[in-house]
Image (cartoon, rainbow, N blue to C red):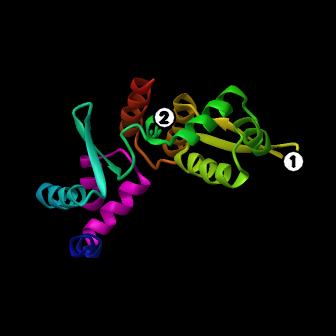
Amino acid sequence: MPERESALKNRNRKMLLGYIKNHPGVTFRSLKEMYDLTDGNLRYHLGFLEKNRDITSKFKGGKKVYFPKGMSASGLEHPGMGNINRDQKRIVKVVRQDPGITKKEISRMLKMSRRKLDTNLRKLLDKGLVRGFVDDGVTGYEYVSKRDIRKEVFKLLVIKLIREEIDEETFNILREELDNEG
């Protein structure tokens, strides 16, 4: 795709994209100050990246903030139950009812082959709907709620603020978005 290649060949766009990936929720003003670009030049490059779907933007608190593709303003991309197949829904139901359940127990309860279970469980893990953990050498699985995700995102935001990877204004915008998700 030639347009995609040109997006990444341009030094300014490559630099902006890298910064936005590492600093989701960054404001137009912060980008302008960081890279000393004119308003028009910055708008052009950000517009190009949005058109190519490398980034997204949203107005928050009267300011435009930018995110890498695949990340919403809150950082929450919980796929929800609508994006999974029937077998995956059955697995999620069992895992929600019995946190810490093992693959062997899931397979037995659902009368599902281990191969089919492994395939579907891997997809659920990739989508972030379930997570595995080890307890006394046994791997169990649990459902990941949007609330759990919000807590993890908030912890990451605090760490980024402490490390000065995001400014207080961006932190407050993202925290407000998290609160509105709840």
Magenta-colored stretch includes residue 30: yes
Where residue 176 sits, quadrant-wise, is: top left
Q: Amino acid at mark 1?
A: Gly
Question: Which of the pair 42/34 is nearer the observer?
Answer: 42
Q: Earlier in the sequence, mark 2 or mark 1?
A: 2
Where residue 44 sits, quadrant-wise, is: bottom left
- Of the 4 image quadrants, the one containing the C terminus is top left
Question: Which of the pair 48/40 is nearer the observer?
Answer: 48
Give me the C-alpha separation between circle 2 and circle 1: 30 Å
- Relative image position of residue 1 (x, y in whole percent): 25, 74
Between disc 2 and disc 1, the foreground one is 2
Kind of element beneath mark 1: loop
Q: Is residue 125 above or below residue 46?
A: above
Q: Which residues are magenta?
A: 11-36
Question: Which of the pair 113/129 is nearer the observer?
Answer: 113
- Residue at image location 57% in from the left, 41% down from the top: 88
- Relative image position of residue 46 (x, y in whole percent): 22, 57
Figure label count = 2
- Relative image position of residue 59 (x, y in whole percent): 24, 37
- Residue at image location 60% in from the left, 47% down from the top: 125
Question: Which of the pair 22/143 is nearer the observer?
Answer: 143
Kind of element beneath mark 2: helix
Q: Amino acid at mark 2?
A: Met
Q: Is residue 26 above or below residue 173?
A: below
Side of 55 where 40 appears, left or right: left
Q: Using the image, tell me which numbered label, if any, was put on residue 81.
A: 2
Residue beneath disc 1? 137
Where residue 149 sits, quadrant-wise, is: top right
